[in-house]
Amino acid sequence: MGKSRKARSAGADAKKDGRHTAEVEKFPVIALGASAGGLTALEHFLKAVPTDSGAAYVVIQHLAPTQTSRLTELLGQEARISVVEATEGCLLEPNHAYVIPPGRYIAIADGALHLTEMDSGYRLPIDFFLRSLAVERQDRAAAVILSGTGSDGTLGVQAVKGEGGIVAVQSPESAEYPGMPESAIATGQADFVLPPEDLSVALLGYFQHPLVPAGKSEPAERNRELMSILALLRDRKGHDFSLYKHSTLIRRIRRRMAIHGLERYGDYLRWVRERPEELDKLFRELLIQVSGFFRDAEAFRTLEDSVIPRLFEGRQRDEPVRIWVPGCSSGEEAYSIAILLQEYMDSVGESWPVQIFATDIDERALNIGRSGRFPASITADVSPQRLRQFFGRRGESFEVVKALRQMLIFAEQDLIKDPPFSRLDLISCRNVLIYMGPELQKRVLSLFHYALNPGGFLFLGTSETIGNADELFETVNRGAKLYRCRTGTAGRMAFPGGGSLFPQPPAAMLTPTALAAARRETTDIGALAQRAVLQEYAAPFIVVDGDNQIQYFHGRTGKFLEPPSGAPSVNVIQMCREPLRPRMRSILHSARAERRAVRGSAVQIDGAGGEELVRLTARPLSTPGGPEGLILVLLEELGPLADQEHIEVAQLNEGDSERVTFLEQELAYTKEALQATIEELETSNEELKSSNEELQSSNEELQSSNEELETSREELQSVNEELHTVNAELESEVEALSRASDDMNNLLASTDLGIIFLDPHLRVERFTPAATRIVPLIESDIGRPFNHLAHGLGYQRLEQDIRQVMDTLAQLERRVEDQNGNAYVLRIRPYRTSDGRVSGAVLAFVDVADPA
């Protein structure tokens, strides 16, 4: 308790003296989260912390809210730094550890700790503190997850990592209870996975690394090494980060270098070349993984009130609401929007089909989203009512109900190079644009404008704006970052050529040899095609490669092509409107096989003003040194069908008539075969129905198993109550030990001998009242090193003799005098425990009468 008072006093002095300066704020803050089995892990971690670590430590241990905790005292016995209990408003200081008190949440703001009453229900104190720490300290924050059950801390480590902090997790095999470490590791955010004592060393090494402090600019000569690293990353993962914000790239690469103890970019370049798996970790480092249900609650309330109802205005009952969430991470944001949509439909008593396309380049995160299963810590963000309606409890996690999951389609998609969705009512792209450079932001916003329906909405993050794109979007709510697509915008963006905003990497990322090859390979397909078309055509066209992937669009192609449903694709056959698909296959095959231009016959399609005729023409496209296998497909509009009567219909000769008759017979045979196939499919359908009934039966069995699991849970609850009984017995034993301690204290108080007990580090543990007449001791001296006391015995070798007795186990006697000239015989004996260990020393002073 003396240490706690000293910490409060120091905090008050710091406030009074103004010592809480920007310089002081730069020290790291390391949060230690633990639950069951955490005491041992915390002791091992803090025991490895040196006295001059330069960091502050905050211990968040799950504690019984109604019982007094001895955690501060226990950790203080093992740690070399000062360990105190956290108090309201105390300022953090380096080389101190602050322990959460029972029944309280703890948070950090402006360098001070703040305590709030812990409510009932799900208690997640680790997540609570880590979220505040992420905002407060950003890249000077560290989250450490130690032994425990459940998933507390899982969302918190994502918040810390998202703000540039570091995440360290106890290795599950070293944890008494691995639940919390495993849940944190499953997020993919852990930078270190080690035993507790090694985590302490690793974190100090990281924060003392010269590259960790941010704000330093990069010399120009290092750009080539950085671009080479990004080029290797692009080659391995297929994603180009070169147009992202330079400062973000530098900061993330520096983090990886610091983790490996590397100081030069050239060393890291060699590291990733020799260890390609490091590129996978760098890739995850560069991804934006900050996600959560209803993140920025006020913005989502504005979305709910101002936008969601307008999505359904004038909408036909069979017309789907189409929403795109690019950069969705593990899907929390997309599910949040789905919840708002379902709540609105429930409130008006009607339903519409809903399609929410949730896309990201991180397949691991997408798999979490597809499963719809999230840790119990989402209770911090999702209200109890929504938990009951839209989630089901599955052990230590919550699973989104099936009806909500069916609204979402998760797909891997690169926002930069893959084609967008179209005819969208809402795009929610939050906290993605802030990581992009200005040019890339401009192009992405233009792409969003293309993808949205006129009057569609754009929902951005709190730190994002539309910049200079006022001609594309109008502001709906500036605070909530809600915008609306302007209608009738001049020069509305056409579908991006090749489906990519930046189809080729920057030249700076390539070696001279690769650059020359790239220039040959990247002949401007658009310019080549336009020259050919302008020579003999004046119509929209596309360019496809040998795999039928569209590489270039020109003109208005909407009558011929449309994005397919489901995963994004630029396959020309999949994008073709249904009546044109057979003709497209035919002319592409003929053009490749015959190496000549092939003009297809007119095809009838449904247009906006009635039936129309269109024609497809394919011709090989090549140039010396250019890519091989390109085909240019001309898309001709012949006009309304009613206006084409003047077009002469080709006459058939006798041979052609026979051919037609033969084909008609073949068609009849094909119809018969098709009918047989349909009947077989109907039979298969009956079998599938039977299988479905079997699956339903299996589902009932699973339900029965679930009920058995519920019974098991009740049995576990009973075991838990037994454990409480055992705990009560242990408390009784503690009381007995306390009585024994009281007996010892009374015995010492009644004796007239001066006795001082020292621990193995020669710190005062206890003393008799008589000892205070010889050595000036007070209660607050307990815990102080004995050699720090002004004992005035004139005994220069006292400390050496005490250590000698502890080493040799031999008693030693010396004659000493106090400051008043009183003589004593000092007996120094080793302090032995019940199991024979030496755990300190005992100093006994025997009064000797003056011979004079």
Image (cartoon, rainbow, N blue to C red):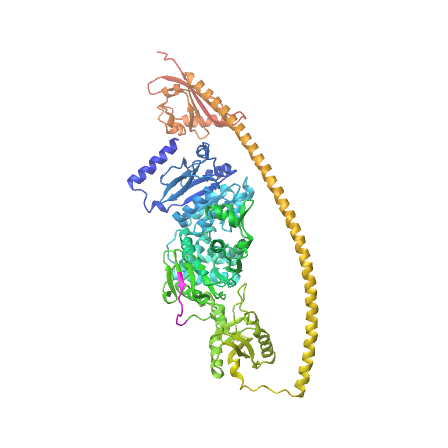
Residue 472 is left or right of residue 725, and the answer is left
Measured from the top left, where is residue 563 in percent x and y? 52, 68
Name the quarter where the N terminus is drawn: top left
Say which residue appears at 68% left-offset and 73% top-offset: 671
Boundaries of the magenta span: 483-491
Name the image quarter holding residue 717. Answer: top right
Measured from the top left, where is residue 3 in percent x and y? 38, 33
- Vertical arrangement, residue 460 with respect to residue 593, above or below: above
- Vertical arrangement, residue 275 with respect to residue 71, above or below: below
Farthest top residue?
852
Q: Is residue 488 magenta?
A: yes
How many badges with numbers are in the image?
0
Residue 380 in sight? yes
- Vertical arrangement, residue 99 with respect to residue 790, above or below: below
Name the quarter where the C terminus is drawn: top left
Depth order, front residue of 436/368: 368
Magenta residues: mostly which secondary structure? loop
Depth order, front residue of 505/8: 8
